[in-house]
Amino acid sequence: MRFLTIAIPAAALALSACGSETSGEFTTEDGETGEYTIDQESGAASMTIDTPDGEVSMRSGADVPLDLPAGFSLISGAKVISNTVVDQADGKGTIISFTSEKAPEAIAEYYRKEAEAAGIDIQIETSINGGKMLGGEGPSGTTFSVTAYPSDDGTTGQLLIGEGVG
């Protein structure tokens, strides 16, 4: 799915260039055009970009409603730091950054069960510096990864799920 390689960097670049603007338009180096808005109060951002493959939209912020695929949920007790949802013609993706009081191993095991129940084949698993990372692929181009590392707030994690045809 192109959302990881195109939409997220384009969104970050476009939104970082906004400065104090709350809305505007932009054109990428590839000639793709888009619009963005930023809610100054909540910090939530949204963007649409017209690409040769169709429109890509992105919403990002701590208060953006969770939009996880069926069978996936935010681990209980977690606090969302940021939630980014990207929709495009060939699928959609979600990236959730969160904190939790649960240990990295418990977070990894929770998401392993959800991923395997969704038919995702875990292809990578690693432990480093007290943290855990899992990743894999499933049917119809679904991609999955979760990372969880100890932090001053307990554990900081990131869940990424992409759905669609690559």
Image (tube, rainbow, N blue to C red):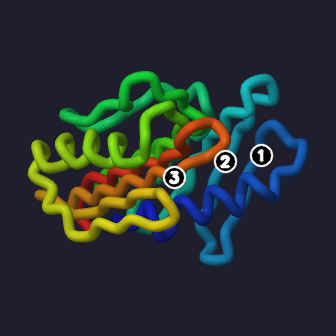
Give amino acid for label 3: Tyr
Residue furthest right in the image: 20
Mark 1–mark 2 CB contact (< 8 Å): yes
Give amino acid for label 2: Glu
Dividing the image into 4 quarters, which one contains the C terminus? bottom left
Q: CA distance from mark 1 to mark 3?
A: 36 Å
Residue drawn at x 46%, y 57% as measured from the top left: 131
Give amino acid for label 1: Gly
Pick whichever, 60 or 21, lies toward us: 60
Sooner in the amino-acid sequence: mark 1 or mark 2: 1
Up/down of 76 relative to 60, above or below: above
Sooner in the amino-acid sequence: mark 1 or mark 3: 1
For mark 2, what is the residue?
Answer: 35
For mark 1, what is the residue?
Answer: 24
Can you give x and y, in whole percent of width and height, for residue 93 in the image? Answer: 38, 50
Instruction: Categorize mark 1 by other alpha carbons within 10 Å: few (<14), some (14-19), many (20+).
Output: some
Pick whichever, 155 or 9, lies toward us: 155
Up/down of 100 relative to 36, above or below: above
Instruction: Categorize mark 2 by other alpha carbons within 10 Å: few (<14), some (14-19), many (20+).
Output: some
Q: Check residue 79 in the rendering and tell me which mark sits there, or answer none.
A: none
Dividing the image into 4 quarters, which one contains the N terminus? bottom left
